[in-house]
């Protein structure tokens, strides 16, 4: 449930209601799953998270997603799962996705594709947050126009008049296409966060209209790798230009990479955005939680 920001906290007024959201980038195999399952429960508690969204399209050995893995993510506190170009790598998901509204595929797949591309996630008090999954078209499959699809969805669910917050996962190869989507949606959604590249970018910001943005959230997985795959075979293919063994997921300790978002309940606009990096090889970055009305007067641990 959205919480009240305590008096004196940075950037807010006394009694202002905020919505706390965590978006995690592409989960790459077992190390990524382990990082999500290890850290999400404590992050939900420490940051009073109202919504946790995870891109899980590479969760099953680097290729796709299964029903069993969906259940494991839900059990550890994930609310909504997004995907991308690997959504159908595990064929069982084709039938399962129609039965589970918490798993999204890109909304700009052609009409008639199984599943849904957006979800109104309910909070306990009756309010909702809208999660939208889109996929870019530069250097990727030729899907329908993601910009037009976003327009159509927002026409029925305008920010501030329905959903308490709107989060867009823009799963795309080109950083230019992701950034163009961010500016296109500025002032109309709470955040546009990129996925797919498996590398966290350092451009977290809030655009002039109040939309938070980061080009890529990064990967949840082993960073002693080539975008989550074992180093030696990946390097060999670049060096020799010859086909070789099928790339396998790197199996070292995983890093959880994500983005922490705080939005204003009344307007839906972003008031804080920060990267989240925990565990594994990357330099850690764990934002300090803002104090809330629930924590006012609490002593230190």
Image: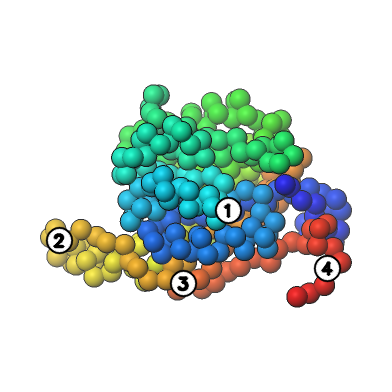
Q: Which comes before the other along the chain, label 3 or label 2?
A: 2
Q: Secondary structure at mark 4?
A: loop
The CA distance from mark 2 to mark 4 is: 58 Å
The CA distance from mark 4 to mark 3 is: 31 Å
Q: Secondary structure at mark 2?
A: loop
Q: Which comes before the other along the chain, label 2 or label 4?
A: 2
Q: Which residue is mark 3?
A: 280
Give the answer, above or below, for where 137 lies relative to 278: above
Quadrant containing the C terminus is bottom right
Q: Which comes before the other along the chain, label 4 or label 1?
A: 1
- Pinpoint residue 140: horizontal percent, then vertical percent: 33, 42
- Pinpoint residue 163: horizontal percent, then vertical percent: 67, 35
Q: Which comes before the other along the chain, label 3 or label 1?
A: 1
Q: Secondary structure at mark 1?
A: loop
Q: Which comes before the other along the chain, label 1 or label 2?
A: 1
Q: Which residue is mark 4?
A: 298
Residue located 28% across and 69% down the image: 231
Q: Of tags 1 and 2, which is closer to the observer?
A: 1
The CA distance from mark 3 to mark 1 is: 21 Å
Q: Is residue 118 visible?
A: yes
Label drawn at residue 244: 2
Q: Which residue is mark 1?
A: 77
């Amino acid at each position: 449930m959205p919480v009240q920001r305590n008096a004196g906290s940075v950037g807010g007024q006394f009694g202002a209601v905020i919505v706390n959201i965590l978006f995690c980038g592409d989960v790459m195999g077992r190390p990524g799953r382990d990082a999500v399952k290890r850290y999400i429960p404590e992050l939900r508690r420490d940051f009073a998270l109202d919504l946790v969204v995870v891109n899980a399209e590479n969760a099953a050995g680097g290729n796709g997603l299964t029903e069993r893995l969906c259940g494991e993510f839900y059990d550890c506190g994930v609310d909504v799962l997004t995907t991308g170009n690997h959504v159908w790598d595990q064929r069982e998901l084709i039938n399962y996705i129609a039965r589970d509204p918490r798993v999204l595929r890109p909304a700009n797949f052609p009409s008639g594709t199984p599943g849904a591309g957006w979800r109104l996630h309910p909070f306990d008090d009756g309010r909702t947050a809208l999660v939208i999954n889109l996929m870019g078209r530069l250097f990727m499959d030729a899907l329908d126009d993601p910009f037009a699809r976003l327009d159509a969805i927002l026409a029925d669910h305008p920010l501030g008049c329905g959903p308490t917050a709107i989060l867009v996962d823009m799963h795309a190869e080109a950083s230019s296409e992701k950034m163009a989507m961010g500016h296109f949606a500025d002032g109309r959604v709470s955040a546009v966060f990129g996925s797919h590249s498996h590398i966290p970018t350092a451009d977290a910001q809030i655009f002039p209209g109040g939309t938070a943005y980061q080009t890529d959230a990064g990967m949840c997985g082993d960073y002693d790798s080539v975008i989550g795959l074992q180093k030696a075979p990946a390097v060999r293919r670049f060096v020799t230009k010859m086909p070789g063994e099928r790339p396998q997921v790197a199996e070292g300790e995983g890093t959880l990479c994500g983005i922490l978002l705080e939005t204003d309940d009344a307007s839906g606009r972003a008031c804080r955005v920060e990267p989240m990096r925990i565990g594994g090889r990357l330099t850690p970055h764990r934002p300090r939680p803002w104090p809330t009305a629930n924590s006012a007067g609490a002593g230190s641990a």
